[in-house]
Image (cartoon, rainbow, N blue to C red):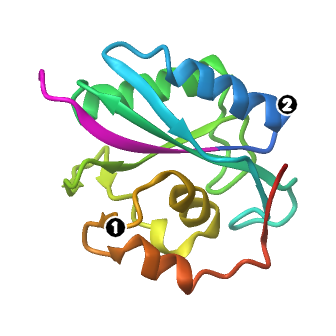
Amino acid sequence: MNDRVSVYIGLGSNLQNPKRQVETALEELAQLPDTSLLDHSSLYRSRPVGPQDQDDFINAVAHLSTALAADSLLDALQQLEQQHHRVRERRWGPRSLDLDLLLYGARTLDTPRLKVPHPESAKRSFVLLPLHEVAPTDLRIPGLGLLQTLVTGTERSDIERLA
């Protein structure tokens, strides 16, 4: 695939120095083959989704340009998670690094391995607020609507933008 695609990656961590995990992952995303880091959001602190018996998360969104196919990009993201010693013990549990492919151009993908846009994107302030920070104001999330509209209705009591 030679055409470049604009993609957005959600990053999150709540283990092993989460701020550093996210900052390091942003640097590593910029090193992926056939991929450029165009921008990234501020860091945000958010309450965990699911089990509340865990630390808050540090989140961000990265905007990349890539020539990688969606499955190849997913493979690269999962490899980065493994390099950060990601362990999947329970659904929505604590993690050293979580990398979610939020948007892959304007495409909708629904395979056993990958669903894009990320199915929970519209419900999560820790996705919408950092995404809004780095995305064009007229960004439309396939099947969900205009980002600006989704952000307007976002609950903000569970999230804090860090300086």
Q: CA distance from mark 2 to mark 1?
A: 36 Å
Q: 104 or 75, which is in the foreground? A: 104
Q: Which mark is residue 42?
A: none
Q: Is residue 132 left or right of residue 56?
A: left
- For mark 1, does the 10 Å Cα neighbourhood hold few (<14), some (14 to 19), or many (20 or more) residues? few
Instruction: Say whether disc 2 or disc 1 marks the residue closer to the N-terminus.
Output: 2
**Label 2 Cα neighbours within 10 Å, binned few <14 / some 14-19 / many ≥20:** few
Camera-side residue: 76 or 135? 135
Q: Is residue 6 a member of the stretch shown in magenta?
A: yes
Q: Is residue 157 left or right of residue 103?
A: right
Q: Is residue 98 left or right of residue 67?
A: right
The residue lying at 69 percent from left, 47 percent from top is: 42
Q: Give the magenta-colored segment's residue range.
A: 1-11
Residue 56 appears in which quarter of the rendering?
bottom right
In the depicted structure, whether residue 34 falls above or below residue 3: above
| Count of residue discs | 2
Residue 138's disc is: 1
Q: Residue drawn 74% across and 29% down? A: 21
Task: Give the percent coordinates (x, y) of residue 15.
Answer: 82, 38
Amino acid of disc 1: Asp
- Residue 131 % position (x, y): 52, 57
Looking at the rendered structure, the secondary structure element under dot 2 is loop
Q: Secondary structure at mark 1?
A: loop
Quadrant hosting residue 70: top left
Indicate the position of residue 96 as horizontal and vertical percent values: 73, 34
Residue 64 on the magenta segment = no
Residue at horizontal 69%, vertical 67%?
50
Between circles 2 and 1, the one closer to the viewer is: 1
On the image, numbered disc 2 is attached to which residue?
Answer: 16
Does 55 appear above or below 39? below
Which kind of residue does numbered mark 2 sit on?
A: Gln
Asked if residue 95 is positioned above or below residue 141 in the image, the reply reads: above
